[in-house]
């Protein structure tokens, strides 16, 4: 109950209830009309704000965009078909987001890994691709990225990993070998970068209440909840599980399922949309993915 009254909808309903009470006491149509007008105005402004925050022209327009160098652009061009397909104006927005990402987050090598320019650009581009439809794309659930050369032993889980997201320490860890393989082969439904960044975005959206979420975080969480709802359908879940399209690891828990289907969304979108169109559309909405970004 306490959480409800802290929410935006709870506050609005409280205003309506208060207005109805005083209308019952004073029989003032003016007071009732004013209160209802206030509520309608609030919802109208909120709806307009959300619509604008999902509009590609608004999301990707910047007065002063940060630029990256030609060698950096070449790294993206050579390794990301997503980037090559973008219209020139959206490529500029992609460049800006890559530059901002590298200013915001630290990337640190472990066990002899040298964090060179190529590694930094590839990591930033992976995150930018995943969050390209989000108006607010920088999140606080991680601050540092650690790179290991290969599988590494985690002192926290006491097990070997090729990647992980730790919300308590606010770090993401990658095996560089496996991160690079996910970029190099972009149609095998394995992309370690997309996978771990998805965990961080989901954590960020779930960590905030409705009132404090950005539109992007809210969209992501709504999509997450829609997916959980359709997974409750036993027939649909059975079809998913036995399709052999999604690897078995996807069914470990809800969080892993979200990360795996996002890998599939970017790696084999046509197959995904033909096999599970309803699930594909939910994912598309949750990250605000737009076909209008791309050249014909």
Image: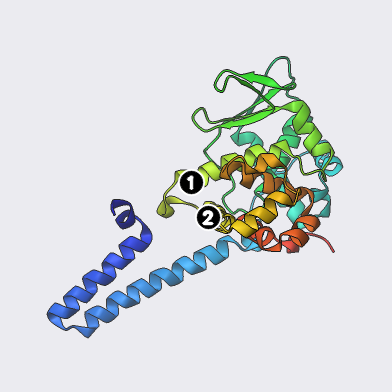
Kindly identify the residue that appears in the image at 58 percent across and 42 percent down: 253
Badge 1 marks a residue whose secondary structure is helix
CB-based contact (under 8 Å), mark 1 and mark 2: no
Q: Is residue 155 above or below residue 23?
A: above
Q: State the image quarter where residue 124 is shown.
A: top right
* Sooner in the amino-acid sequence: mark 1 or mark 2: 1
* Label 2: element kind: helix
Residue 87 visible somewhere in the drawing: no
Position of residue 111 in the picture relative to residue 42 (left or right): right
Residue 103 lies, with reference to residue 31, above or below; the image says above
Evaluate whether residue 46 shows in this view: yes
Q: Which residue is mark 1?
A: 206
Q: Identify which residue, 85 or 168, lies in the foreground.
A: 168
Q: How many marks on residues?
A: 2
Q: Residue furthest top?
A: 112
Horizontal side of residue 80 vs 131, given as left or right: right
Disc nearest the viewer among 1 and 2? 2
Disc 1 and disc 2: Cα gap in Å?
A: 11 Å
Q: Please report the residue visible at 22 percent of the width from the left and 84 percent of the height from the top.
A: 29
Give 236 or 36, whichever is nearer the viewer. Answer: 236
Quarter of the figure that contains the N terminus: bottom left
User: How far across and down, in percent of the image, does residue 257 sit?
Assistant: 63, 45
| Depth order, front residue of 249/295 | 249
Disc marking residue 101: none
The quarter holding residue 186 reads top right
Residue at mark 2: 225
Q: Position of residue 289 (x, y in %)?
A: 68, 58
Residue at 61% over, 53% down: 134
């Amino acid at each position: 109950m306490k959480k409800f009254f802290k929410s935006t909808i709870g506050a609005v309903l409280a205003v309506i209830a208060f207005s109805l009470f005083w209308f019952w006491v004073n029989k003032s149509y003016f007071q009732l009309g004013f209160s209802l007008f206030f509520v309608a105005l609030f919802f109208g402004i909120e709806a307009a704000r959300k619509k604008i925050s999902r509009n590609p022209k608004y999301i990707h327009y910047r007065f002063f965009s940060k630029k990256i160098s030609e060698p950096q652009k070449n790294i993206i061009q050579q390794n990301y078909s997503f980037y090559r397909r973008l219209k020139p104006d959206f490529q500029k927005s992609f460049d800006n987001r890559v530059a901002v990402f590298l200013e915001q987050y630290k990337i640190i090598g472990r066990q002899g890994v040298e964090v060179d320019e190529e590694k930094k650009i590839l990591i930033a581009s992976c995150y930018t691709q995943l969050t390209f439809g989000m108006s607010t794309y920088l999140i606080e659930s991680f601050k540092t990225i650690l790179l290991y050369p290969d599988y590494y032993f985690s002192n926290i889980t006491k097990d070997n990993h090729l990647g992980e997201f730790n919300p308590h320490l606010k770090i993401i860890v990658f095996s560089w070998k496996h991160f690079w393989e996910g970029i190099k082969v972009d149609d095998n439904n394995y992309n370690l970068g997309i996978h771990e960044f998805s965990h961080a975005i989901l954590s960020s959206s779930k960590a905030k209440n409705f009132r404090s979420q950005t539109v992007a975080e809210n969209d992501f969480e709504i999509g997450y909840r829609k997916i959980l709802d359709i997974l409750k359908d036993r027939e649909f879940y059975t079809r998913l599980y036995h399709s052999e399209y999604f690897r078995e690891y996807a069914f470990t828990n809800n969080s892993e399922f979200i990360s795996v289907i996002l890998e599939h969304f970017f790696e084999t979108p046509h197959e995904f949309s033909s096999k599970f169109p309803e699930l594909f559309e939910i994912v598309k909405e949750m990250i605000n993915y737009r076909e209008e970004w791309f050249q014909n």
